[in-house]
Image (tube, coloured by chain):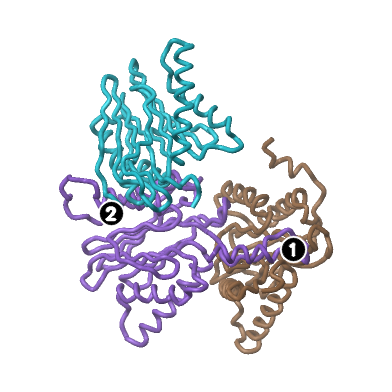
Chain colours: A cyan, B brown, C purple
Amino acid sequence: MSIESYNGGAVMAMAGKECLAVVCDKRLGARLTTIGMNHSKIYEINPYLYVCLPGLATDALTVYQRLRFRVNMYELKESRKISPQVLCSMLSNLLYEHRFGNYFIGGVVAGLDPATGKTYLYAMDCLGAITIGTEGFVTGGHCEEQLYGTCEALYRPDLGPEELLEVASQAFLSACDRDAGSGWGAFVYIVTKNKVELKSLKARMD
Amino acid sequence: MSNSYPVNTGSSVIGLCFDDGVVIAADTLVSYGKMARFFDCSRLYKVNQTTIAGCGGDYADYQFLHNLIEQKQIDREANEQGVDLSPRALHSWLTRVQYNRRSKFEPLWTSWVVGGIDEGKPFLGFVDKLGTAYKDSIIATGFGTYMAVPVMRKFYDDKNGRITRDEAIGLMKKCIGLLFARDCSAHNMYEIAVVDANGAEILGPLRATHDWSNVKEHRTS
Amino acid sequence: MFKEMQSLANAQMTDASPHKVAGFYPYADNGGTLAAIAGDGFVVIGGDTRLTTGYQIYSREASKLTKLTDKTIIGSCGCWCDSLTFTKGLHIRLQYYLYENNKPISTNATAQLVSNMLYQKRFFPYYVSTIVAGLDADNQGAVYSYDPVGSTERHRYRAQGTAGSLIQPFLDCVLGRGNQTAPEPEKLTKEQAMIYLKDAFMSAAEREIGCGDFLQIMIVTPQGVEEERFKLRKD
């Protein structure tokens, strides 16, 4: 078992019409043992911008703290909020600085522009290679393959917030249920122009 | 378990179905590692008037199988006059021999292209050292999968799969020329085996020219 | 076990070889994806027709499905030389069954036979993913899946092979309906099952390079076996 899958866990972000779903599972494992059942992999940068760090949990915490520091410095220096594009570059750069001796995490950045309603989705590997989520969803973590299968089949463009919650949750839970390393429920952030809702999903606990 | 590696080896074999027959081509070089060692070894084999075969990989293993196939054909001529070894039968037989030897961990390190006329229709099949087998209208082994298949596939599609005997032979010559230019273990002396309703024959040995215009035609940069 | 064999094979890379070749390894991964859905009075099984080795496509038209009887289909993929040998061996066993019992073998008996035949090679396995799909004695659809050494289970639906991990959770969602409170929809029809199968393979071909070219579907009903081909992306 590789170090990337030591803790397990899965994340996903899906875009709808002027709304966004950011999803992660709740499991924290140590190889095959589950040691945490309420472990979020989603970190809020601001109410319209989220970063998900699946992979080795200890690295995820470190990377989040270092990223938070850089975001704070950026916002102090520039006197403005960080945008999804900039955050994505920032995380990518942070990861690539450790090109040799890397952090064992992936990265998903999901943001919504509250003025226009435009959604921004990015995913990257442990070295910071960015893929832009033009298909409407990005995935990461231990059951990435399963997530690609369900998202590709269930996703439709321009969903409203209620439908998006339904589709994203179904895609995510179905994928997690076929992976021993992920699951034990899920957190879903539904982000719209004027509201953020955090839902906690119940799922099978095995 | 011992000697599970090739020693003297032949390079690519390429094959193509045309309207009413099949062509298979291969050069005549057998190499010892990177050394060009034997220049005039035929790797194509006319089994009978309906069946031809070409072989890449270890030349000793090819000769061993060649002898077995030859004996099969002789037995047929002696005992079942007029019932020739069909390409489909030979292809199937080769899959079993290759698979049984790989299961004994004593592989015959070869890859085969078998062609011919089976029940009036062109037949072209592939078998490798594991017994992996498939049938297709275009087949190449070794370096030919990278160099020759795209050229043959394009030609095939441009002609909507309708190719004459002469066009097929011309295409083989072109592909051998490409392989000679780019595959360091290929050679300019080669043979072409053709089979159609009128019977099978092996053309050659022929010579590929040192003509790079042919190569440039297929370059994208 | 496979790792041991691989290292054994690599250890044979000797000075005597004039080539830089890794030693002999008796298995190959030739890809392929299978999925089957059972219903009341029918079963559908689909397999892609792409045959690969690494990033190279051997053939775009290699069928992974074999009709065994008027009520039973087998799909096999993975190490293609093992698939060929296994299905060939199975055909012979079924002929013996026919001659000895003077009737075609039932789907359930085929399912058990396949498991036994796989387990017979427990210590040098056929490296294949297998699905047996057919109608049982009550004309109900039955899907059996196997691992390379014959572990088996009967399912309502199942996906296997390179894109199995992409298709299975989708089928869980639309057919298993886990994590859903909405009432069970009306009985699954053959037509709906076909749509799910095509959707599943189209989605899988989008993301998995080992899956593509064509989807070959066999539909088994008490009336017999029908076949359909469906285009998938070729890149």
Image position, residue B210 (x, y; %)? 82, 48
Say which chain tag 2 marks.
C
Confirm whether circles 2 and 1 share one chain: no
Determine if residue B32 is in view.
yes
Displayed quadrant of residue B115 = bottom right
Image position, residue B153 (x, y; %)? 60, 50
Seen from the viewer's position, the closer of residues B133 and A199 is: A199
Q: Which mark is residue B10?
A: 1
**Left or right side of A77 for A190:** left
Amino acid carrying label 1: it is: Gly
Image position, residue A86 (x, y; %)? 48, 21
Q: Residue at x 73, y 52 (%)?
A: B179
Q: Residue at x 35, y 51 (%)?
A: A178
Q: Residue furthest bottom?
A: B79
Disc 2: CA contacts within 10 A as few (<14), some (14-19) or many (>=20): many
Q: Secondary structure at mark 2?
A: helix
Seen from the viewer's position, the closer of residues A89 and A158 is: A89
Relative to C214, say whether C222 is above or below.
below
Relative to C155, say whether C215 is above or below.
above
Q: Measure the C-alpha gap from mark 2 to mark 1.
A: 50 Å
Disc 1: CA contacts within 10 A as few (<14), some (14-19) or many (>=20): many
Image position, residue A56 (x, y; %)? 46, 41
Q: Secondary structure at mark 1?
A: strand
Relative to C64, say whether A93 is above or below.
above
Q: Which mark is residue C193?
A: 2
Displayed quadrant of residue B120 = bottom right
Relative to B80, say whether C58 is above or below.
above
Q: Which mark is residue C203?
A: none
Amino acid carrying label 2: it is: Ala
